[in-house]
Image (cartoon, rainbow, N blue to C red):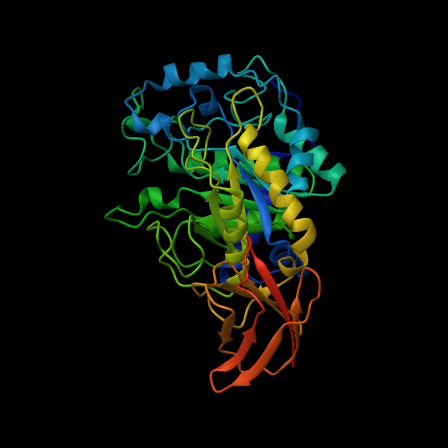
């Protein structure tokens, strides 16, 4: 048996459960700390996602366990080969911070069920099951604290390898599962005990990022995930910790942010984000290449230009971008990913003022670009303009117009259609920014 943690799991869960029942009858009221955390989250605008686990050993992406008929005991042997000797929390956090990102979200436990921290709830974790024997979440949490960057934990509601998880529409190819042992109550208590560890022993956590609710979206009888009690547990342990759930539907009570997968809010090109946009802080998660977890053949990285324009377009919708990297099994961030982190950071060092702390601009996304706003300052981000004139359908009055880069005045005049910007030459570059002072 391991030594006892700082807080009794049973006591914490009992206390959280009593509060949960009270919240069910009264409704969820975010605490002042939570509301402040929401504000700060929305101002951050940029975070980095890390999908990392023993699936990285196979180098076939994070869904490898689900995509092929694999015996769960054979899959688990990857843990014995998982030795990320090149993992260096300081190097990771430094590279991510250099990109201009304000927070990191890492997979604490993905759908394959392997825990990336020293959990008491299962021996199937990075300390007990691998020769590495180091708690990478602890090291990352400590380094994030040192470097002043927030840490969020991804946590899967699914477990393809545990017998007690009630199987949904995924993980059905896994060999060796005993369906007779499905036990929701047992599995639910296991999850909540793990969440209690993460929120008790790893310092201040910015958010718990859930995934997997969609696994039961085809059930004939609606599946009761008991989210209210689980969300109440999180808010009890850390009131400022935000709850997000990548369920692809309208947010439930108790959630503090709304997540959109592979799409800017309002778009549904990937088929996962058709839900209405709520008034909660918004976040879009997107990949640098294609797969979330490291995949050997997936080297088709988006260009720096694409990533910058995607970040700006997301901010133009009033949302954050959570940009994913899949670290290798040896603990390295792929070179191409690191190159893009530093390139984005160079751009953000110059232009971050037009992204951080902004709200959605006055004009919806156009073929030429987007807008962001900060008080009386409206930033016009031009990606693609083939003319020396741009008509902006604005109702507000424009007092001044100039390039953000060097404050060169830009000619403008009021028209029946709004405000026309007049350039000496066609704007060019990754993002040609014009700042308007409005009233």
Q: How many marks?
A: 0
Residue 378, image x, y percentages: 61, 70
Nearest to the observer: residue 392 or residue 173:
392
Position of the C terminus by quadrant: bottom right
Q: Look at the image and tell me whether residue 281 can be seen.
A: no
Residue 176, image x, y percentages: 31, 19
Residue displayed at 41% across by 30% down: 298
Residue displayed at 26% across by 46% down: 218
Residue furthest toward the bottom? Answer: 416
Task: Please say if 366 is above or below 145.
Answer: below
Nearest to the observer: residue 68 or residue 173:
68
Residue displayed at 60% across by 39% down: 341
Residue 285, image x, y percentages: 48, 47
Task: Please say if 117 is above or below 15.
Answer: above
Q: Find residue 177 and report its image quarter.
A: top left
Indicate left or right for 77 with 319 as reference.
Answer: left
Position of the N terminus by quadrant: top right
Indicate left or right for 200 with 122 as reference.
Answer: right
Indicate left or right for 240 with 123 as reference.
Answer: right
Residue furthest toward the left? Answer: 220
Residue 125, image x, y percentages: 53, 22
Q: Find residue 133 and report its image quarter.
A: top right
Q: Find residue 215 and report its image quarter.
A: top left
Nearest to the observer: residue 111 or residue 372:
372
Q: Look at the image and tell me whether residue 9 can be seen.
A: yes
Residue furthest toward the front? Answer: 424
Nearest to the observer: residue 148 or residue 29:
148
């Amino acid at each position: 048996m391991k030594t006892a943690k700082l807080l009794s799991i049973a006591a914490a869960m009992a206390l959280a459960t009593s509060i949960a029942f009270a919240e069910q009858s009264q409704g969820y009221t975010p605490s002042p700390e939570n509301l402040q955390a929401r504000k700060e989250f929305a101002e951050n605008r940029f975070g980095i996602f890390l999908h990392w686990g023993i699936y990285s050993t196979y180098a076939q992406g994070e869904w490898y366990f689900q995509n092929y008929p694999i015996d769960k005991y054979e899959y688990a042997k990857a843990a014995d080969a998982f030795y990320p000797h090149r993992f260096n929390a300081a190097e990771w956090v430094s590279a991510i911070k250099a990109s201009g990102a304000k927070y990191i979200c890492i997979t604490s436990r993905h759908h394959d069920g392997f825990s990336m921290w020293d959990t008491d709830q299962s021996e199937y974790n990075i300390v007990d099951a691998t020769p590495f024997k180091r708690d990478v979440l602890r090291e990352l949490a400590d380094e994030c604290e040192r470097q002043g960057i927030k840490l969020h934990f991804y946590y899967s509601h699914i477990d393809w390898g545990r017998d007690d998880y009630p199987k949904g529409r995924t993980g059905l190819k896994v060999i060796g599962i005993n369906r007779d042992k499905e036990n929701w109550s047992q599995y639910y208590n296991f999850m909540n005990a793990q969440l209690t560890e993460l929120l008790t022993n790893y310092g201040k956590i910015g958010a718990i990022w859930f995934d997997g609710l969609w696994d039961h979206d085809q059930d004939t009888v609606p599946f009761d995930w008991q989210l209210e009690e689980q969300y109440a547990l999180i808010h009890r342990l850390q009131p400022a910790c935000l709850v997000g759930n990548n369920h692809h539907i309208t947010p439930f009570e108790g959630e503090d942010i709304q997540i959109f997968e592979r799409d800017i809010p309002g778009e549904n090109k990937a088929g996962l984000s058709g839900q209405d946009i709520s008034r909660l802080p918004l976040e879009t998660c997107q990949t640098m290449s294609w797969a979330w977890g490291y995949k050997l053949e997936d080297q088709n990285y988006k260009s720096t230009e694409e990533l910058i324009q995607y970040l700006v377009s997301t901010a133009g919708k009033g949302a954050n971008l959570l940009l994913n990297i899949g670290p290798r099994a040896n603990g390295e961030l792929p070179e191409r990913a690191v190159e893009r982190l530093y390139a984005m950071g160079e751009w953000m060092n110059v232009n971050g003022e037009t992204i951080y702390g902004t709200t959605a601009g006055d004009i919806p996304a156009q073929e030429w670009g987007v807008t962001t706003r900060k008080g009386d300052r409206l930033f016009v981000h031009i990606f693609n303009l083939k003319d020396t004139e741009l008509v902006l359908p604005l109702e507000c009055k424009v007092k001044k117009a100039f390039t953000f880069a060097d404050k060169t005045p830009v000619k403008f005049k009021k028209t029946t259609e709004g405000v026309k910007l007049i350039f000496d030459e066609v704007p060019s570059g990754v993002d040609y920014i014009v700042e308007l002072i409005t009233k």
